[in-house]
Image (tube, grey):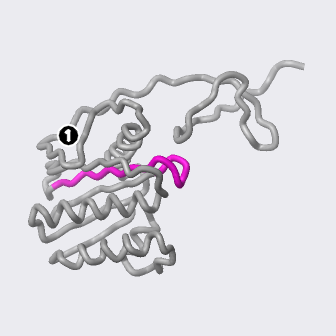
Amino acid sequence: MVIAHCDGGSRGNPGPAGFGAVIEDQNGRILARLSEYLGKRTNNYAEYSALLAVLAWTLEHRHTKLRVVADSELMVKQMQGKYKVNSPDLRPLWEEARRRANKLERFEIAHTLRGGNRDADRLANEAMDRGMGRAPTAELSSSRTATRPSPQKPPQPRQVLEGFVKNGVVHLIDGELPDGIFVRVIREESSGS
């Protein structure tokens, strides 16, 4: 059985979207890393695109058993038949994923929290960076195969920006942040009068 961690993301939802996936054998040896920029799409479209890419790779490489781990609860529960697929945009993707999964001898899909999908999330973000013209730390193609994991990228330097909160919205005094990045807000009490 091969195990695939897959993730999709969109900056803006819809916005620049991409997916990433890491496919391993039962011993944890990496068989493939998949990563692709999708253009302007929704997060759910990107999640299904990751699943479809994993299924295509599995069938192409003649594996018959697949376990998928994803952090999209919606997609996982739809694939398990626990949620209906009401979106006309997602329905064809879901149908194609079901068709491909049915070609396998065994197909399992399970939900994990985002932390359980770190490498796939990183690949999805690198795909979005590439598509947005930002240079990712490591170029990965959608068909790259590796025998061992690539080195972890170094932590990004922290940037401190000052601002204030008005009506629950953070307003920056100087500078701006690009769309799609995560920030941590640290509250400091003002000592001025």
Q: Is residue 108 above or below residue 23?
A: below
User: What element does badge 1 sit on?
Assistant: loop
In this figure, which residue is indicated by the disc labeled 1?
149
Q: Residue 171's image quarter?
A: top right
Residue at screen point 90% across, 19% down: 193
> Nearest the camera: 189 or 10?
10
> Nearest the camera: 151 or 133?
133
Q: Is residue 140 above or below residue 76?
A: above
Spot occupied by residue 81 in the image (x, y as percentages of width and height) = 39, 81
Q: Residue 135's image quarter?
A: top left
Residue at screen point 52% across, 41% down: 180
Residue at screen point 80% across, 23% down: 190
Spot occupied by residue 11 in the image (x, y as percentages of width and height) = 51, 47
Give amino acid for label 1: Pro
- Magenta region, main secondary structure: strand
Q: Is residue 63 above or below residue 151?
A: below
Single out the residue that lies furthest toward the right: 193
Spot occupied by residue 66 in the image (x, y as percentages of width and height) = 20, 67
Q: Is residue 88 above or below residue 45?
A: below
